[in-house]
Image: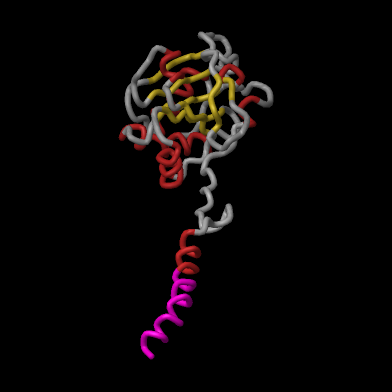
Amino acid sequence: MNRRLALLTLPLLLVLATACTTDREAPRPAGQGTVAARPSPFEGCADLTEGPAGPGDDEATGDPLPELTLTCFTGDTPVALRDIRGPAVVNIWASWCPPCRKELPAFQRLHERADGQLRVVGVNTQDSRSAAQSIGEDFGVRFPMLFDQGKAFQRALERSAFPMTVFVGADGGVRYIDTSGALDDAQLAELVKQHLGIAVPA
């Protein structure tokens, strides 16, 4: 009797076991059970190349920015550096660089205080997108960000220091490159006034 009952219930057990295994191994439809990508903390890059050049001291000239196109962190159209409308302050940084992390909030404050007088642009280099995104979120960095994984911008400038800040005049010429270390609000305001002829509150 027990043997006959076991033979009758064995097919049912096999069906149930197969169904459970199939449910666990079945692929989920696309978009289900996955974490959605976090939105970028940074502003888009479209405005970097639009509008007239801003105010500033145009008496001095310098070499133009390199002929280089970089990806916008938000996925906007890639940006040709020579198309960026100056005056601009371009900060080259990486998440693994302690002085870079220290000065990023000062660049965000410059972006807020500039009130349209100049553009603040970040270039994240030799880094991962996830690390850069985390820094942007943690430090409240919102200004437009370009992505340069292979440090092409630094090679074109023939500089390798971190952090590095490039001051670009209204005519698109590079006026000054600072590699002195982490800049604070007062130092940034002084460099902007000295090299771009723009008074920004510190």
* Along the line of sight, the residue nearer the viewer: 173 or 130: 130
Q: Position of residue 130 (x, y in %)?
A: 43, 41
Please state the extent of the stretch shown in magenta in the rendering: 1-17
17 left or right of 179? right
* Secondary structure mostly seen in the magenta stretch: helix
Q: Is residue 99 left or right of residue 109?
A: left
Rendered location of residue 95, percent (x, y): 37, 36
Question: Does the stretch in magenta take in 3?
Answer: yes
Q: Is residue 75 left or right of residue 140?
A: right
Furthest toward the bottom, the residue is 1
Left or right: residue 121 versus residue 101 is: right
Of residues 71 and 163, the one nearer the viewer is 71
Numbered marks: total: 0
Q: Height in image: 122 above or below 179?
A: below
- Point 38% across, 32% down: residue: 94
Question: What residue lies at 51% left-to-right and 27% top-to-bottom?
Answer: 199
In the image, residue 85 lies at what x, y percent? 61, 22
Vertical comparison of 42 with 177: above or below: below
Quadrant location, the C terminus: top left
192 drawn magenta: no
Res 113 seen here: no
Q: Is residue 34 visible?
A: yes
Reply above or below: 195 against 37. Answer: above
Split into 4 quadrants, where in the image is the N terminus? bottom left
Of residues 57 and 75, the one drawn nearer to the viewer in this rendering: 75
Residue 178 placement: quadrant: top left
Residues 146 and 119: in front is: 146
Q: Residue at x 54, y 11 (%)?
A: 64
